[in-house]
Image: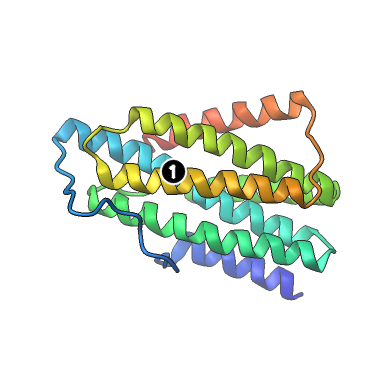
Amino acid sequence: MDALLNAADTALRTLFAAPRAAHACPTVADTNTALDTQETQQSAGLMRVNHVGEVCAQALYAAQALATKNEALRAHFVRASIEEADHLAWTAQRLEELGARPSLLNPLWYAGAFGMGLIAGRLGDAVSLGFVVETERQVGEHLQSHLELLPERDHASRSIVVQMRDDELRHADEAQAAGAAALPPPVQQLMRAAAKIMTTVANRI
């Protein structure tokens, strides 16, 4: 029952409450970000996608924590979710600074990610951890690609993305060390296809 209540609380906080970070947003000291209209739109679209990714991360970890019967693993998922909450807050803050809104489809993204996390969790702890490894590694690649797409002088967004990338790859390593099973290549490809659809739509809507 506690796990179920925690999952419900995470959903409500992620979708309807203003996110709060436990750690300060990464910044570049003494560097102001001055963007023209085109650069602002480019950054806003990319940061909206990153914000959606963090909405999905909250859903995935909440579902996996709910699915596992292993208390130590549940604590692992909860701890990772708390760390990901920083990313959620940072990207929300950056969107506000850019004068942009989050994705209008966030409830849909959350529901889909929660369902995927629940399925992974029901397949066993090793598979659930393997899902984390593959997800976080793909997210790390995605964030690295954003560093190539963000305007060079958007120092604020770039600082956030660098920290997020490093954290996601660390989460992948931690899940691997916790006993993750390798996912079959077709599953990895399906995850990439789903991520491609999400990032394409979220960039605009």
Residue 192, x across and y down, in percent = 61, 28
Left or right: 47 with respect to 115?
left
Outermost bottom residue = 2
Residue 166, x across and y down, in percent = 50, 45
Outermost front residue = 29
User: Can you say which quadrant of the picture contains the N terminus?
Assistant: bottom right
Left or right: 73 with respect to 27?
right
Specify the amino acid type for callout 1.
Asn
Q: Residue at x 75, y 24 (%)?
A: 185
The image quadrant of residue 75 is bottom right
Residue 92, x across and y down, in percent = 36, 55
Left or right: 58 with respect to 151?
right
Residue 140, x across and y down, in percent = 53, 38
User: Can you say which quadrant of the picture contains the C terminus?
Assistant: top left
Query: Does residue 120 appear in this view?
Result: no
Say which element carries label 1: helix
For disc 1, the marked residue is 50
Q: How many marks?
A: 1
Name the one closer to the observer, 116 or 174.
174
Name the one closer to the observer, 155 or 40.
155
Query: Does residue 24 appear in this view?
Result: yes
Q: Is residue 8 above or below residue 176?
A: below
Q: Is residue 13 above or below residue 204?
A: below
Q: Residue at x 80, y 28 (%)?
A: 184
Q: Residue at x 60, y 31 (%)?
A: 194
The image quadrant of residue 161 is top left
Colouring style: rainbow
Name the one closer to the observer, 132 or 115.
132
